[in-house]
Image (cartoon, helix red, strand yellow):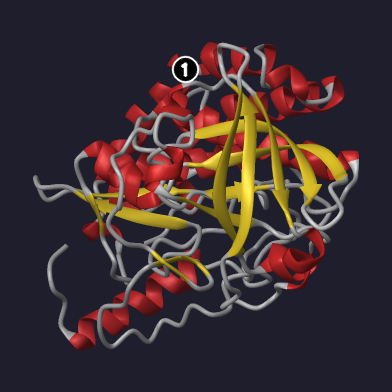
Amino acid sequence: MRALSPILRSVILCAAWAAVAPAQDTSKSPRTPKPKVAKADSGDTVTKPKKAPNPRLFRSEAPLEITLTLNVKQIKRDKNADAPWRAASLRYTDADGKAVTVPVRVKTRGIWRLKHCDFPPLRLKVGDKVADGTLFANLDEPKLVSYCRNLDRYEQYVLQEAQLYRIYRQLTDLSHKVRVLRISYADSATGKVETTRWSFLIEDPAQVAARLGGTIVARKGAAADDLDPAQSALVFTYLYFIANTDVSFSGLHNGEIIGFPDGRNVPVPYDFDFAGVIDANYAGVDPSLPIRDVRTRLFRGYCAHADAYPAAFDLFRARRAAIEALYTDTVGTLIAPATVKRTLAYFGEFYDDVRTPEQARRRLLSDCVK
């Protein structure tokens, strides 16, 4: 990404912020006088991976049953961004039927969920020696997306979000891998299992970059001409597909940028729980946007990348059957049948929007960001 003059950078930042920044991203300011370290979420600095990319856990998408033992009351009290790492352990049964226990550390993370959820989102840290030879070796520090409240509805939100990561991987390898887990949350203080719920782990951003041969670009302020047009077109088409406006690549909110030796800077989205296709009861949209409901799609792609959109639309058409097939496999069938039906109908509306070039121009490209 080339260096920008302070004046030009301020102009670009203001324009990019007004175009794509969501309401939930209140901490991201358009005034960025110098490069900043990107943050995946509050208190978590993105760094180079400490361990080898492509760990064993993410080489399969088959749901995995585990027990996470931790001090439940203590972790629920850790509401601050600088909460400490806490002792915990993971237990699972390997392919030979042997019980494997891996000591780990966990800490709370996030912004909205940390403040509003009964059970907070967590980040895991797994030691090299204790995890060697297990499924959890070389994980770095992945995010765990767990239930927000101990209700079936919130568990379904988790499964729907995991599915959106899997869909994006049908479109591009420049994306996060996930692994769906059936977790029994056991309290280390009492030995009692508090609840058993579906959750998932997300590949660490630095490991995504390392796996692909790139590095995280730890600077805010990216504009259209800083990003690879083909991948930008794909990302913003995907965000329209799932109806997600809760992202800002300029502000590095729910999106990171991976730089490659050939000079390309590729945007990678994550955190999809505010997507309209999920329609979580807590999700909302930026009041500055011309929509009032998360289910209303709004295209936020850059006009400068207009030549790249037809290829992105073609890819979505080509991958439609593969995307829909995800709702009939071992992960997709965990989602309630009525939700699957509603989801596929919603995706069908997208395909109507891009059925012809004229439809796409009218429904999507007329709203592109200049």
Residue 115 higher or lower than 232, as above or below: below
| Count of marks overlaid on the render | 1
Q: Residue at x 67, y 49 (%)?
A: 273
Q: Residue furthest left?
A: 262
**Toward the viewer: 48 or 130?**
130
Residue 204 higher or lower than 113, as above or below: above
Q: Residue at x 79, y 37 (%)?
A: 197
- Quarter assignment of residue 164: top right
Query: How far across and down, in percent of the image, does residue 165 sit?
Result: 54, 36
Any part of residue 41 in sight: yes
> Is disc 1 placed on a helix, strand or loop?
loop
Residue type indicated by callout 1: Arg
Direction from residue 88 to residue 126 in the image, left or right: left
Quarter of the image for the N terminus: give it.
Answer: bottom left
Q: Residue at x 45, y 53 (%)?
A: 141
Direction from residue 117 to residue 96 in the image, left or right: left
Residue on which disc 1 sits: 319
Query: How far across and down, in percent of the image, does residue 279 sit?
Result: 77, 45
